[in-house]
Image (spheres, rainbow, N blue to C red):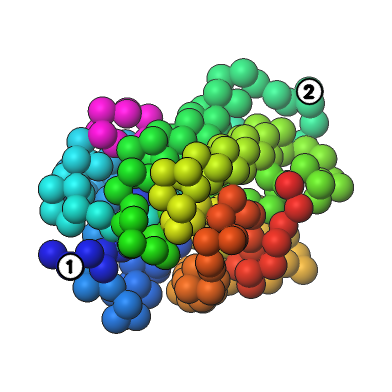
């Protein structure tokens, strides 16, 4: 296979599936690979061994990759939705949010950042959320989701620092996709917000990724390429 390979993790979700379609139609990549719980091999964010095996599989198939997009994430755990008050904080629910939104992506970085091409311009992008911004938090609430995404942003920043030493031209960023009409956001789409279809969100994300340079690594960007405060 050519080294012009892109990989979408979480490709069975609304944004992930749309991104895979956009990447395939862009003609920027010779190969677009997809991983998720229903692929072969399967990738389970809660099971590091499956992540390691998938990374080994991609290494065998494609060697280095030009783009890795982590489109995983969860807004709630089971029937428990985002907390409106500290009175609703539940340790098991919070642990579940961190497992999916923070620890899982951290393990993806551990196993997939080493696969980025070292001949310039390779990107690892993970989907974060504007509500993970501490500086932009004016409403409070959503304790578990907010804090899990804030922690993810810190992981991106730290990983970008190490990546710059190991692969100076590679890029590691966090992306806020905006509010997208998917099962994840069902019931949480507030009046007045622009709710995008997955295809529109994927096009915007891809456009931002195309415009990134090595100096943008470690950043947190929205779907228009604007910097979001930490």
Which residue appears farthest toward the top when viewing the image? 91
* Of residues 10 and 103, the one drawn nearer to the viewer in this rendering: 103
Q: Verify whether residue 48 appears in magenta.
A: yes
Identify residue for label 1: 2
Please identify the quarter of the rendering in which residue 121 is found.
Answer: bottom left
Horizontal and vertical percent position of residue 44: 32, 36
Residue lying furthest right in this view?
Answer: 138
Q: Is residue 212 or residue 88 the one in the foreground?
A: 212
Where residue 203 sits: x, y (%)? 48, 76
Q: Vertical placement of 108 versus 179: above or below? A: above
Task: Please give the name of the residue rendered at 56% of the width and 55% of the height, measured from the top-left corner.
Answer: 217
Local packing at callout 1 (Cα closer than 10 Å; few below 14, some 14-19, many 20+) is few
Residue at 19% of width from left, 47% of height from top? 59
> Horizontally, is 76 left or right of 56 in the view?
right
- x 28%, y 73%: residue: 29
Up the image or down, 116 lies above or below 94; here it is below
Q: Which residue is labeled 2 in the image? A: 87
The residue stretch that appears in magenta: 45-52
Q: Position of residue 5 (x, y in %)?
A: 26, 64
175 over 19 or under it: above or below: above
Q: Quadrant of residue 146?
A: top right
Prevailing secondary structure class for the magenta stretch in the rendered image: helix
Q: CA distance from mark 2 to mark 1?
A: 53 Å
Is label 2 in contact with label 1 (beta carbons under 8 Å)? no
Nearer to me, 52 or 200: 52
Image quadrant holding the N terminus, namely bottom left
Magenta region includes residue 206: no
Which callout, 2 or 1, points to the residue nearer the camera? 1
């Amino acid at each position: 296979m050519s080294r012009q390979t892109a990989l979408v993790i979480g490709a069975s979700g609304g944004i992930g599936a749309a991104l895979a379609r956009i990447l395939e139609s862009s003609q920027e990549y010779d190969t677009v690979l997809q991983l998720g719980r229903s692929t072969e091999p399967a990738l389970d964010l809660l099971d590091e061994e499956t992540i390691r095996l998938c990374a080994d599989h991609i290494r065998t198939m494609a060697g280095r990759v030009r783009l890795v997009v982590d489109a995983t994430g969860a807004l709630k755990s089971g029937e428990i939705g985002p907390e409106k008050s500290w009175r609703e904080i539940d340790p098991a629910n919070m642990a579940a949010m961190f497992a999916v939104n923070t620890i899982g992506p951290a393990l993806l970085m551990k196993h997939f950042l080493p696969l980025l091409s070292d001949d310039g311009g390779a990107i690892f992008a993970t989907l974060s959320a504007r509500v993970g911004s501490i500086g932009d938090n004016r409403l409070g609430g959503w304790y578990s989701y907010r804090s899990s995404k804030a922690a993810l942003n810190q992981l991106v920043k730290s990983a970008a620092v190490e990546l710059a030493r190991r692969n100076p031209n590679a890029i590691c960023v966090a992306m806020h996709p905006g509010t997208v009409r998917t099962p994840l956001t069902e019931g949480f789409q507030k009046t007045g917000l622009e709710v995008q279809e997955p295809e529109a969100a994927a096009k915007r994300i891809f456009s931002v990724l195309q415009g990134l340079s090595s100096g943008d690594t470690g950043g947190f960007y929205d779907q228009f390429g604007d910097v979001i405060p930490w």
